[in-house]
Amino acid sequence: MSKKHPIISVVGSSGAGTSTVKSTFDQIFRREGISAVSIEGDAFHRYNRADMKKELQKRYDAGDQGFSHFSYEANELKELERVFREYGETGKGKTRHYVHDDAEAEKWGTPPGHFTDWRDFADESDLLFYEGLHGCVVNDEVNLSALADLKIGVVPVINLEWIQKIHRDRASRGYSTEAVTDVILRRMHAYVHCITPQFTETDINFQRVPVVDTSNPFIARWIPTADESLVVIRFKNPRGIDFPYLTSMINGSWMSRANSIVIPGNRQDLAMQLILTPLIERLVREAKRA
């Protein structure tokens, strides 16, 4: 960790809603006049789209049916660690973008399924913001958790995550339910061993829980809405958290444990603003003093 060049790491698996969370962070940065450098987990995939298909087939033919983008070996985690460390030490670094579709291709001038060139961070930033799958990985080769100053987990209960992925991939990528189911099955080993352990490293977790029936996510016709959900917010260290203030400011909220608060799903943005703004302000304030 670096007081002078702080790093915020947001970790969430596919369909968890990390994009919405990033929007909330962007609002806080804009409102508080904070200059943030943003990097995406996709930028540190090891393979472009065509090469990933080849690698998947190669491993499948060799009997490995659990390889996916969730897997450690499908990502340049040492490079991500190097970026975290370099930024923490100097406030500098490089990143790139993975281009998903034609709209992004037009924006970045790179074909879909490929990476842009590496580019230097903007000068004089206040903090580094990471959003992706692996920002809190701790294994035999890397320790990203130790390099981040504020770590946020964003994860729905697993049936809800599957519903969101099935609907997103069918709508935006043209996949069949069967094809998405195959992807889910292929990812399960890495989800258990590579993704979920990170949520014990995070300082705060936001877990969305539907209050409607999601017992068979593969036939669900609709994604449960925010009004049909609760969000459990867990603090790794609840010391200093003003729970009475939070429950008074967020209608319908209550404490479920000494380190957890439950809120209506449609109050998540408000809760994040209330909880994260002072934490981010403190990081930046201490950085400027350093």
Image: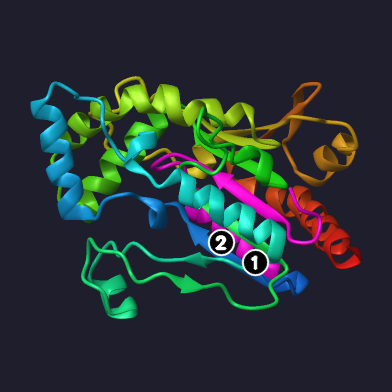
Furthest-left residue in view?
61
Q: What is the quadrant of the C terminus in the image?
A: bottom right
User: Which residue is disc 2 drawn over?
Assistant: 23
Q: Is residue 157 left or right of residue 36?
A: left
Above or below, 75 against 20 in this view is above
CA distance for labels 2 and 1: 6 Å
The residue that appears at 22% across and 61% down in the rendered structure is 113
- Is residue 222 among the parts visible in the rendering? no
Q: How many residues crowd mark 1 within 10 Å: few (<14), some (14–19), many (20+)?
A: some
In-front residue for pair 90/205: 90
Residue 266, percent from left and from top:
59, 46
x 77%, y 56%: residue = 280
Inspect the image, locate mark 2, and give the three-letter code of the amino acid beneath it: Ser
Examine the rendered structure and indicate whether residue 145 appears above or below residue 267: above
Per the image, is 26 magenta? yes
For label 1, the SS is helix
Q: Which amino acid lies under the numbered mark 1 shown in the image of this protein?
A: Gln
Q: Which residue is denoted by mark 1 in the rendering?
A: 27
Q: Which residues are magenta?
A: 1-29
